[in-house]
Amino acid sequence: MYIYRCQLTFMEKTFFSSREISNCYYTEPLIGNYALAYAMGFCQSPYFNDGTIHYRQHLGALNERGVYVTPATIQGQPRFFVEQFNAQPETYWFAMGRGVLVTRPDGCQMEQDSGTWYARDASGNRTMARPANRPQFGRIRYLAVGNEAVCYVLNPAPIEVPGYVRLGKFMSKARVVSQPLDYQEVAGEHVSVPQLLNPADLPPGIKMELYDLVTVPPTPLVRNALLSGAFYRLDGGTHLPKGMRFGVEGLG
């Protein structure tokens, strides 16, 4: 097994909708390992997104190849950047409908019938204006430029880790410096593992005794865990559970 330590440095403010409270959208100080698997190019998401989730298909293929990426843990005190956003339309014409902000599509005329707005195209076809499920305004908390995070890539053969990746909702740029590590395979009890792990990815032989739970989508993570089982002990004393793989078998 080849293990690489990857240090990510955020070159742009980075946003994941980790937590939503009213009209505030918060990025938690971490990067999930599903996102990193896609960002590093180990699996490819479809160019057109119709809302279908492909984790089982894409990450299951990485399991077959033996590729695994841990979540990324922010180093030191995380820094954030907060700003307001306004996603309301700035078109020449708009109106308020019944629970919907109505805009005029190109090439259409708008008409109102019994309080409901319709768009009529050049062919005479009429389509009712429907509400869009998206926020109109609010506040976003980003991970600020300059934050650093560390994750680990495990693969049965040497692998090339990209020097730059794009992360988050707005495809923000991050630099990646990867370093191959020497390790020993050891067994231990009550081993402290402070970095973030995905509990769904742990093998059956790892016993979790204590941990701090971080509830984020698409899967909860743990940190400051006390584990027993088989480990890779890296240079510097870091322990990674042996046999981790993406736990996507139960997904639809």
Image (spheres, grey):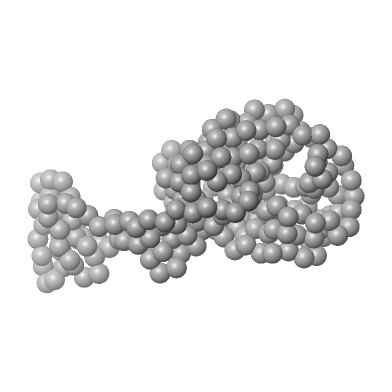
Residue 88 visible, this angle: yes
Q: Name above or below for residue 222 compared with residue 63.
A: below
228 w.r.t. 57: above or below: below
Q: Is residue 103 left or right of residue 38?
A: left
Query: Total of numbered circles in the picture?
Result: 0
Image position, residue 190 (x, y; %)? 86, 60
Name the residue located 89 percent from the left edge and 57 percent from the top edge.
189
**Which image quadrant: the C terminus?**
bottom right
| Left-right relation of 220 to 103 | right
The image quadrant of residue 209 is bottom right
x, y percent for residue 100: 24, 65
Q: Quadrant of residue 25?
A: bottom left
- Image height of 32 relative to 65, above or below: below
Residue depicted at 52% across the width and 52% down the height = 79
Residue 247 placement (x, y as % from top left):
68, 52
Left or right: residue 4 versus residue 175 is right
Q: Is residue 185 above or below residue 91?
A: above
Q: Residue at x 9, y 60 (%)?
A: 111
Work out whether residue 217 or residue 60 is closer to the camera in this orientation and state it.
Answer: 217
Question: Can the viewer see residue 120 in this picture?
Answer: no
Q: Residue at x 57, y 60 (%)?
A: 216
In the image, 113 versus 68, the foreground residue is: 68
